[in-house]
Amino acid sequence: MTSHSPAPLTTIGFDADDTLWQNEQFFRLNEARFAEMLRPHAPGIEIEPRLLEAERRNLAFYGFGIKGFVLSMIETAVELTEGRIPAQVIGEILAMGREMLRHPVHTLPHVRETLEALHGQYRMVLITKGDLFDQERKLAASGLGELFDAVEIVSDKSQATYERIFARHGDGASRAMMVGNSLKSDVIPAIAAGAWGVFVPHPLTWVLEHAEEPADAPRFRKIADLGALPGLLAEIV
């Protein structure tokens, strides 16, 4: 195969949270609730940056998702009050987490029609990170499960992750594309693995998922929403 005749694209990976359905907005709302809840017990302290610091520190222990978020809130509350946080507040934090885990799933615009249009033309793989039970719950609640040929729920996303998944479910990364809202997790490591990386920005992407756009990468593309994906595929395939 020469460089003038690239291998055809056969596999498309899709991120889930904030690519297929809303996610970060619920974290933001509960961050604000947590800060208001804690402020009377930790006056004069900027609470949100301390929570983010705890989340960053705890990723290696708890991974991504609601349970790690709740544990980080509890840890922050204990630290900022030097252990004097009332048990009632801890109970309220736990209740917030349970509420998040029961929240309805709201799919983003153009998601279903795009997945239905591409279903059967490509191998469709959902590639998401986070808590296994919660991600399985959201996929089931979304009603999108039947449109995917495979589902991979991983602890993190790296170049090796995409090499492994696209070898298992497709014809290798060079014949695959990854679509998502996180440059750090969905786009840059997929391109490093040899795949196409398609960035679909979301206005509330978590700060720990931010990165510079790899604008010079030949396989980098950016679209406004998932509805633009079929047109992009027609251009590059």
Image (spheres, rainbow, N blue to C red):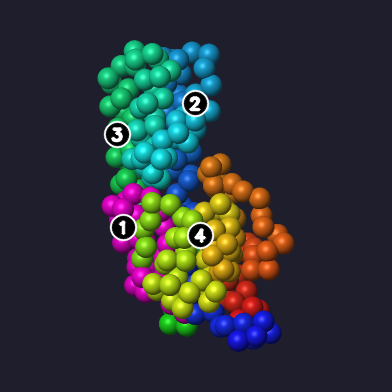
Mark 2 is on which residue type?
Arg
How far apart marks 1 and 2 lie (CA) works out to 30 Å
Describe the element under mark 3 as helix, strand or loop.
Answer: helix
How far apart marks 3 and 1 lie (CA) works out to 21 Å
At x 36%, y 70%, the residue is 150
* Residue 182 in the image: above or below residue 29: below
How far apart marks 1 and 4 lie (CA) works out to 24 Å
Q: Which image quadrant for residue 38?
A: top left
Mark 4 is on which residue type?
Gln
Q: Nearer the viewer, residue 142 or 176?
A: 176
Mark 1 is on which residue type?
Glu
The residues colored magenta run 122-150
Q: Is mark 1 in CB contact (under 8 Å) with mark 4? A: no
- The residue beneath circle 4 is 159
How far apart marks 4 and 2 lie (CA) works out to 30 Å
- The residue beneath circle 2 is 50
Describe the element under mark 4 as helix, strand or loop.
Answer: helix
Describe the element under mark 2 as helix, strand or loop.
Answer: helix
Q: Is mark 2 in CB contact (under 8 Å) with mark 3? A: no
Left or right: where 50 falls relative to 148:
right
Label 4: how many Cα within 10 Å (few below 14, some 14–19, many 20+) = some
Q: Nearer the viewer, mark 4 or mark 2?
A: 4
Question: Residue 133: image x %, image y %?
Answer: 28, 52
- The residue beneath circle 3 is 95
How far apart marks 2 and 3 lie (CA) works out to 21 Å
Badge 2 or badge 3: first in the primary sequence: 2
Mark 3 is on which residue type?
Ala
- The residue beneath circle 1 is 136
* Residue 166 in the image: above or below residue 51: below
At x 36%, y 20%, the residue is 78
At x 51%, y 59%, the residue is 159
Q: Nearer the viewer, residue 57 or 145?
A: 57
